[in-house]
Image (cartoon, rainbow, N blue to C red):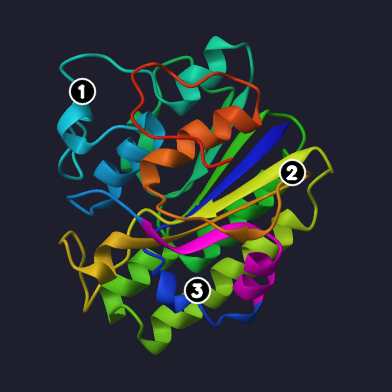
């Protein structure tokens, strides 16, 4: 099975609890609005933990500046390449470039600036390449930028949520039948910041849907469980270094 992973940076779980499009997806997915991210709840450490299924103390990146781990570990893109499958990455926050080792990606597409316009263009480009890769990662950065500029849960922030879900709906509606979809966030936020142990920062949504995945509520999910879940959907064994568990 092919997998589309969509991550909306800074999307608080309670921000989508009553969102009409998000609710539609929750109703047909294996989902939770109470998954936990890692500390520090910053973008790059959280992504490193998602893709490498270990705590920041293990992968070594504890700020938004990448630090190579003292002991190398394969990430999700690296694991997919090891089993001769292809990955594509569409993103608009440049620091994420270190999520994969050189040669692990079939396609890397970067647009500068985490804006609504770049989110739209990234989604367009991902749609243009649907079906060509076994794993597609679409990162949408505008919600986090709106949180920092205007405050989490502000009117502008909620508008960015609306626009991001319009893009999610647009790409998912065009997927072939052989795709599973994982929708999540890296962290939440409060006021105009994040990075703390506050529930507003640490709680993230997670939705998993596809053929043979029953709708229901996920219990006790962590951001570190996402990579093991994705490789299981793809028929690939998890890396022995990974600490998370498959949720399916």
Q: Earlier in the sequence, mark 2 or mark 1?
A: 1
* Callout 3 secondary element: helix
Please give the residue where the numbered disc 1 appears in the rendered image.
68
Dot 3 and dot 2 residues touching (CB under 8 Å): no
Span shown in magenta: 21-35
Q: Is residue 37 left or right of residue 229?
A: left
The residue most toward the bottom is: 155
Density class for disc 2 (Cα within 10 Å; few <14, some 14-19, many ≥20) is few
In the shown orientation, is residue 232 left or right of residue 132?
A: left
Image spot of residue 211 (x, y percent): 78, 44
Residue 55, x across and y down, in percent: 24, 36
The residue singled out by tag 3 in the image is 161
Residue under label 2, please give it: 128
Cα distance between the residues tagged 2 and 1: 33 Å
Q: CA distance from mark 1 to mark 3?
A: 32 Å
Q: In percent of the image, x 44 and y 50: which residue is there?
A: 92
Q: Is residue 69 left or right of residue 146?
A: left
Q: Position of residue 94 (x, y in %)?
A: 35, 42
Q: How far separated are the C-alphas under marks 3 and 2?
A: 23 Å
Mark 1 is surrounded, within 10 Å at the Cα level, by few (under 14), some (14 to 19) or many (20 or more) other residues, namely few
Q: In the displayed structure, does residue 87 sit left or right of residue 47? A: right
Image point 60% across, 68% down: which residue?
Answer: 165
- In the image, 106 versus 227, the foreground residue is 227
- The disc, 3 or 2, on the residue closer to the chain's N-terminal end is 2
């Amino acid at each position: 099975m092919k997998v589309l992973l969509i991550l909306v940076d800074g999307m608080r779980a309670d921000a989508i609890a009553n969102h009409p499009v998000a609710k539609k997806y929750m109703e047909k997915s294996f989902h939770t609005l109470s998954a936990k991210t890692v500390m520090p709840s910053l973008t790059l450490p959280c992504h490193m933990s998602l893709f490498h299924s270990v705590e920041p103390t293990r992968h070594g990146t504890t700020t938004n500046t990448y630090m190579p781990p003292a002991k190398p570990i394969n990430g999700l893109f690296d694991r997919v390449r090891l089993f001769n499958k292809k990955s594509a990455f569409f993103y608009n926050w440049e620091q994420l470039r270190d999520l994969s080792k050189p040669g692990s990606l079939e396609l890397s597409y970067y647009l500068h600036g985490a804006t609504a316009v770049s989110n739209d263009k990234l989604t367009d480009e991902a749609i243009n390449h649907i079906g060509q890769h076994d794993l597609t990662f679409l990162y949408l950065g505008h919600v986090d930028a709106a949180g920092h500029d205007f405050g989490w849960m502000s009117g502008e922030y909620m508008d960015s949520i609306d626009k991001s879900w319009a893009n999610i709906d647009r790409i998912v509606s065009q997927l072939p039948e052989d795709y599973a979809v994982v929708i999540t966030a890296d962290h939440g936020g409060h006021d105009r910041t994040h990075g703390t142990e506050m529930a507003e920062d640490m709680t993230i949504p997670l939705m998993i849907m596809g053929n043979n995945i029953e709708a229901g509520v996920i219990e006790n999910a962590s951001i570190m469980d996402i990579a093991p879940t994705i490789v299981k959907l793809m028929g690939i064994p998890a890396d022995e270094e990974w600490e998370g568990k498959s949720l399916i």
